[in-house]
Amino acid sequence: MKRISLEGCNRIRAHRLVRHLVGTFFLAVLASIFLCGTADAQDLAPVFVPGTCDLPNVAAVAVRLRCGTVRVPREQARPQAGTFALAVVIIASEQQPALSDPVVYINGGPGEPLTVYAAAQARTDYAPGRDLILVDQRGTGHSEPAICPDHERVLFAANIAFAAEDTSDTVEARRAAYVGCRDEAIRRGLDLTNFGTSVTVEDFEWVRRALGIARWNVYGESYGTTVAVSLAALHAETVRSLVLDSIYPPEPQPLWSATVAQAREALFAHCAKDAACAASYPDLHAMYRQAVSRLRQDPLWVELPPQLRQYSERAQITADLFETLLSRMLYFPPTYPRLPLVIKSVGKGDGGDLGRIIAAEFAAARTQSRGTHAAVECRDRPHFREPLPDGADVLDRIQLYGICATWAELGPAPRVAAETPVPTLVLSGQFDPVSGPALSRHAAAMLGPAARLVVFPRLGHNIRQFSPCGTRIAAAFIDDPQRAPDTSCVDRRPTIRFESNPEKG
């Protein structure tokens, strides 16, 4: 149907007013409403609108970047409900002309930005000969909407306090902060049912169409694997290959404390088999329990580095905060060499490196939109509406239990591409505290024979970021998804050189 502008609609109405004068009023009015309403719907089409690349540290790669926005429907079923603008960055391949099937990278969170890291992504080589597409998911980074911008600082502070110690006061303050965020979003006219993985999947499909891409290769990391698997389930014909890096487990999801404990014990067992580590830390599990027990009786105070002095000069290390910090250290292989020494030092009453560790975690936590995190998780995950199960500990209590029941109604569940025809590569780290090898193996089995699993020893969460070997394997797979990639580099990963501090005993 021919597109009709607002001016054209006005001419139609004027013409039909004349027809009204000769007795055809109802026909004219109905036709005018129909035609102009159709024009409005047609105006909402997948379009990439170029913009400026106002991103950090991109000078060296600026010539390869195209930045802009794609407006997506707030609700696919109701285009008249309005749109949100999503930030999109296309990083041109150094090899030109690029292959026609680009790679779209879907990052984790939910609530973590992506386009701000375009400079680092441009230096990666997991998309050989292909353009790389980055999208800030709705409600994150430079994409609309900011769910509760005036309340994000309150949410951040309440979560930090709760992670340190979940007293009745911190529990109530955290609950009130989320209620305040929800209420602010509603006052600003947001419908909190317009979030969730099912919505995010259609946003990516809208972006694909806006960029004129027939098929693309989908790389999902952490929560991004949930989006990626759902995308493959709903739009398999558009996905040439699928890489799932550090799977975020589908429902029913195990307790986070259980997956962290498995990762922690795997690292402790690795220490016991390493001669140098075993000599310095003969029973790391017992040392860990001793450190936690000591902090429950007598929390430690540590000096904070200069970048945190605006908040406080010191931090109190409670048992809850210590367990939370240790769980986060398991994500990152660069922390492994020092982790046993941190445990041993705390058990002896020495806070040592914890101030620096807190600063690193604080900086990482500030990048997340916690309002968006709740908006997606509360729509996706039914277990957050249930009471905390027996056996839950601090790592479970800092999740969204007790928050989601009053946030928004449960949405459609993320889809699992069971027995998918899409060639799939699953990457898993031995010490991943979110989904270790057992969960990854289960997920790969659900995906069917098209899925290949590669387990990386001595790695945690996000294989691509910390393993050149993992990056090469992913690149080879994307280059030819039908051929099993060479994984021999997995066995050549360097051993962990654990630190010790003999002078402190």
Image (cartoon, grey):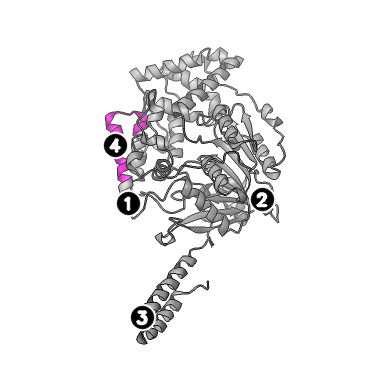
What amino acid type is highlighted by mark number 3?
Answer: Phe
Q: CA distance from mark 1 to mark 4?
A: 20 Å
In percent of width and height, residue 198 lies at 48, 47
- Mark 3 residue element: helix
Q: Earlier in the sequence, mark 2 or mark 3?
A: 3
Q: Which residue is mark 4?
A: 173
* Residue 310, visible in the rendered structure: no
Measured as percent of width and height from the top left, residue 142 is found at: 46, 52
| Residue 380 counted in the magenta span | no
How far apart marks 1 and 3 lie (CA) works out to 41 Å
Q: Is residue 369 left or right of residue 431?
A: left
Q: Secondary structure at mark 4?
A: helix
Going from the N terminus, do you reach mark 1 or mark 3 first?
3
From the viewer's perspective, is residue 338 above or below residue 117? above
Q: Using the image as rendered, state which of residue 61 and residue 12 is in the foreground.
A: 12
Task: Kindly identify the amino acid type of the residue bearing the numbered disc 1.
Answer: Ile
* Residue of label 1: 186
Q: Is residue 182 above or below residue 312?
A: below
Name the image quarter holding residue 469.
Answer: top right
Closer to the N terminus: mark 1 or mark 4?
Answer: 4
Q: Secondary structure at mark 2?
A: loop
Mark 3 or mark 4: name the one nearer the start of the chain. Answer: 3
Q: Which residue is mark 3?
A: 25
Mark 3 vs 4: CB contact within 8 A = no
In whole angstroms, how far apart are the C-alphas of marks 1 and 2? 41 Å
Q: Label 2 belongs to which residue?
A: 130
Quarter of the image for residue 33 reads bottom left
